[in-house]
Image (cartoon, rainbow, N blue to C red):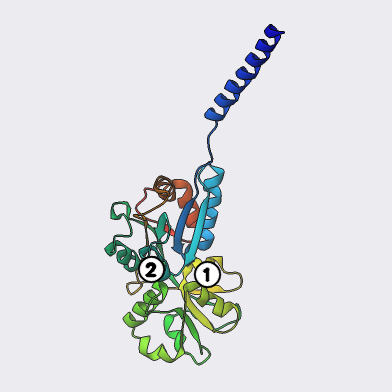
Amino acid sequence: MRTDRSRGWAVVAGLAVLSTGLLAGSRAPEASVTVSAAISLTDCLEAVARVYANEGGAPVRFNFAASNVLSRQIVSGAPVDLFISADDAQMDLAARAGAIDVKTRVPLVGNRLAVVTLPGGPSIRDIRELLQPGVRRIAIGDPAAVPAGKYARDYLLRVGLWEALAAKLVPVSNVRAALGAVENGSADVAITYETDAADAHKARAALIVSGPAAPRIVYPAAVVSAAPNRPGAERLLAYLRGQAAAAIFRQHKFVPLDSGA
């Protein structure tokens, strides 16, 4: 009886050791990465995150909003791992506050402005055609705060149309709200990014802004200084600068920058 009992405990102990070894050899799920990103990146980054997860990367949680809102949140201590802004100004604001690790800052992607309308809406083949009477309301991001609105204002100033169009301009909270104003009929046209037009449900790009007066639009990215998951943020940022992410950026009309991709 003692021998049988001893053998039984030996088997149980052996199974316990085997079970412990299997658990030790298994890989624990990687902690999620929290990304605060400009709202114009929504569709593109969500597509990248799906591919990243399929390739074994950590799950990504997004906080999409206007870049000025995101920078204030990060400076105030929001628990964010990675910040992607639609312009350098908001990233600079976070940097001056010590809220981002400036050594990790990189120019991630580029973009262009677009004038969008609904099919059958005003014909806009030249920016000066915004002056036509059929264009009564032009939605833009708030130039006092929103990068897309600042880019639009700077461009209109360079081509001498800012004052002439002032009465038609309708500032909104972010670039997606400008696109939405066209799609719900509350504006005749909007000045958004080319990428928003590419991902729009109903609106289309009537004009892509180009030429010497066109603004240079750069989206910088950086790891947040107090990132709860810094290793995860660094791995994701490296992935965003690689070949697989670059292909998705291009599909959504973004231009990968400084990545060799």
**Residue located at (56% from left, 50% from top):** 50
- Residue 216 screen position, x and y as percent: 34, 67
Q: Which residue is mark 2?
A: 72
In the picture, which quadrant includes the N terminus?
Answer: top right
Give the number of marks: 2
Label disc, if present, on residue 65 of the rendered structure: none
SS of the residue under disc 2: helix
Could you tell me the amino acid type at mark 2?
Answer: Arg
Give the CA separation, mark 1 to mark 2: 27 Å
**Circle nearer the viewer, 1 or 2:** 2
SS at circle 1: helix
Q: Is residue 88 left or right of residue 11?
A: left
Residue at x 55%, y 31% (from the top left corner): 26
Q: Earlier in the sequence, mark 1 or mark 2?
A: 2
Q: What x and y, as percent, mark residue 256?
A: 41, 55
Q: Position of residue 209 (x, y in %)?
A: 42, 73
Q: Residues within 10 Å of mark 1 (few under 14, many from 20)?
A: many
Q: Which residue is rendered at x = 55% and y = 65% of the image? A: 199
Q: Is residue 227 above or below residue 117?
A: above
- Depicted 135 relative to depicted 65: above or below: below
Give coordinates of residue 253: x percent, y percent: 48, 61
Question: In this orientation, which residue lies closer to the viewer: 234 or 3?
Answer: 3
* Image position of 87 with respect to 123: above or below: above
Residue sitting nearer the eye, 73 or 180: 73
Determine which quarter of the picture holds residue 75: bottom left
Residue type, mark 1 in image: Ala
Q: Residue at x 42, y 70 (%)?
A: 69
Residue beneath disc 1: 197
